[in-house]
Image (cartoon, grey):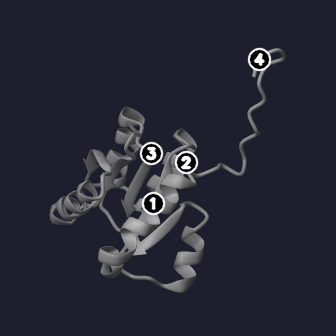
Amino acid sequence: MAMRTRVLLVDDVAVVRRTLRVLLEQHSFEICGEASNGKEAVEKVSELNPDIVILDINMPVMNGVRAAVEIRRNAPETSILFLTAHAIPGVMHMLRRFSDGFVCKASVDHQLIPVLGRIAITPYKNPLSKPRIAPAGKP
């Protein structure tokens, strides 16, 4: 049996998290946890080790961009998908540096699952990490 992709949902609006949970569970994603701000997200990534974090940008306590920077530092193998209410081209270009993609909240119903599928198949590769080399004599 194939492992399901584990997702952490991060949004300060509970109804958004519930809606995302229902949508993702219908498409065989496993919701391993939820957070309502960036600080909680950073803590939950450390605790739960999700494959993908769906991260709102505008949140209290710590915004999504700051959380993404912390998540990249602490868990570079974790993929990040920004969820945003406003798709501003210049901002979206900047966000690509910190994430594997983004989806506008207005397009969630038809864009989220295809984008998550792409991310699940091609997880984030930290451009600063060195390739892993097996010790001599080991495959």
The residue that label 4 is drawn on is 138
The residue that label 1 is drawn on is 117
Q: Looking at the figure, which quarter contains the N terminus?
A: top left
The vertical placement of 106 against 122, above or below, is below
Per the model, the C-alpha gap separating discs 3 and 4 is: 27 Å
- Residue 80 in percent (x, y) is at 48, 56
Q: Secondary structure at mark 1?
A: helix
The residue that label 2 is drawn on is 72
Q: Is residue 31 left or right of residue 14?
A: right
| Foreground: disc 3 or disc 4 | 4
Badge 3: residue crowd in 10 Å (few <14, some 14–19, many ≥20)? many
Q: Residue at x 57, y 54 (%)?
A: 122
The residue that label 3 is drawn on is 51
Q: Is residue 62 left or right of residue 66?
A: left
Q: Is residue 81 visible?
A: no
Pointer 2 or 3: first along the chain: 3
| Foreground: disc 2 or disc 3 | 3
Q: Are marks 2 and 1 in contact (CB under 8 Å)?
A: no
Badge 4: residue crowd in 10 Å (few <14, some 14–19, many ≥20)? few
The number of callouts visible is: 4
Per the model, the C-alpha gap separating discs 4 and 2 is: 29 Å
Per the model, the C-alpha gap separating discs 4 and 1 is: 33 Å
Q: Are marks 3 and 1 in contact (CB under 8 Å)?
A: no
- Residue 108 in percent (x, y) is at 32, 74
The amino acid beneath tag 4 is: Lys
- Location of residue 59 (image quadrant): bottom left
Q: Looking at the figure, which quarter contains the C terminus?
A: top right
Per the model, the C-alpha gap separating discs 2 and 1 is: 20 Å
Q: Are marks 3 and 4 in contact (CB under 8 Å)?
A: no
The amino acid beneath tag 2 is: Arg
Q: Is residue 32 left or right of residue 124?
A: left
